[in-house]
Structure formats: C-alpha cells, structure tokens
Image: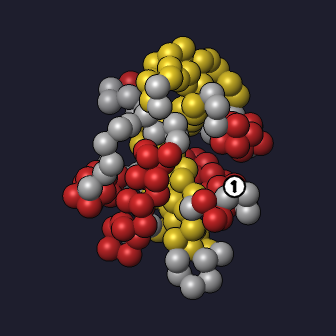
Amino acid sequence: MQLVNCQFKQHGEKVQALFNHAIRHSTALYEYRERSKQDIEQWFNTKHEQGFPIIAMEDDNGQLMGFASYGFFRPYPANKFTGVLAIYVEQAHQGKGVASKLLQALIEKAKLQGLHTLIAAIDENNHASIALHQKFGFEHVGTLKEVGYKFDQWLNLCLYQLMVS
C-alpha cells in the first residue's frame, strides 16, 4: 500500500464509482443523484484550484483502494482555517487500515496548510466512521437531528471536531 496524490486522469473513474456506490447504498452522502464523469472532473478541478489535497491509497498494483480530501467548512472568509473532510474506501479494503492511513495523512496536510480545526460530518449510524474519527481524537460536538432524508427515513448528522493547531 502506498499514499499518492489522487489525480483525475489516473483515479477519476474509481473515485466516481466510490462516490456513486455511497450514494446508492449508504447514508455516507446525503445525495440522491449519482455523479457524472463531468461532476467528478469538476470536483477534482475545484479541489486543486482551492489548494485542497486529494490523497489516494493504492495497492501494490497501483489500484485505488480509497481516497480522502477536505475542503471549506463554510464559504465565508472567517471560516478559512476550518476544513470538513471526507474519506471513502473500496468495500473490499475496509477494515484493513486504509482509512486510518488516509485520515492520518489528511491531518498532517491540514497542519502543514495552517488549518486550525477539522470537522467530520458523519451519519449517526455510520459506526465505523465514528470509531475511526474518535481513534484519532475527534470529539463529538453535536448532532443535527433529522437534517437528511434517504431510504424512507430521517437521518441525524453527527459533527466531530479535531483541533489540529
């Protein structure tokens, strides 16, 4: 396994597949519409233009196992030192330490970029993600009740926060 910079040309198709799997089968993303190739290309372009990292974990054959990134928490100048993160791991590679390595790399990047805090917005039923973030010192700072609706049920969004500086 190795961490690499995630690039659209090399990883875009797999990133799209991971996003769309999460949209179709989970509450990791509070979205209904799958992302097109153009959506993914724009996502990569926006991250790069804004200076945010996209980190990939590849297996020994160069295949994407998962990716992680962060972006603006809110689009206001006073929030420029706060990032909100996302981590997605291929189902076959979950539980093998991929997400931990990606999260550790994101935290290090956030420190280097001068961020003050990272936020993880996690569905309350995503116990694996909650446990991962708690392992790295993220603290539960609140729950937004019934802010999403998917799969015929209301969803609660938990906010976890890590002070990185």
From the top left corner, tell me how far across and down residue 126 is, in percent.
64, 37
Q: Quadrant of residue 53?
A: bottom left
**Tag 1 secondary structure:** helix
Check disc 1: other Cα within 10 Å, few if <14, some if 14-19, many if 20+. Answer: some
Where does the N terminus fall, quadrant-wise?
bottom right
From the top left corner, tell me how far across and down residue 42 is, in percent.
25, 54
From this viewpoint, is residue 159 visible? no
Q: Residue furthest right?
A: 135
Where does the C terminus fall, quadrant-wise?
top right
Q: Quadrant of residue 61?
A: bottom right
From the top left corner, tell me how far across and down residue 74 is, in percent.
38, 28
Question: As rendered, which of 123 and 104 lies closer to the eye?
Answer: 123
Q: Residue furthest top?
A: 145
Which residue has dot 1 on it? 100
Question: As rendered, which of 27 and 86 lies closer to the eye?
Answer: 27
Which residue shows up at 30% across the image and 57% down it?
Answer: 40
The answer to whether residue 164 is above or below residue 64 is: above
The answer to whether residue 13 is above or below residue 38 is: below
The answer to whether residue 91 is above or below residue 81 is: below
Which residue shows up at 46% across the image and 25% down it?
Answer: 152
Which residue shows up at 46% across the image and 57% down it?
Answer: 18
Q: Give, as a three-letter code, the residue at label 1.
A: Ser
**In the shown orientation, is residue 149 left or right of residue 145?**
left
From this viewpoint, is residue 29 visible? yes
**In the shown orientation, is residue 1 left or right of residue 51?**
right
The answer to whether residue 128 is above or below residue 152 is: below
**In the shown orientation, is residue 21 left or right of residue 66?**
left
Which residue shows up at 64% across the image and 31% down it?
Answer: 125
Q: Residue furthest front?
A: 152
Q: Residue furthest left?
A: 38
From the top left corner, tell me how far across and down residue 63 is, in percent.
52, 77
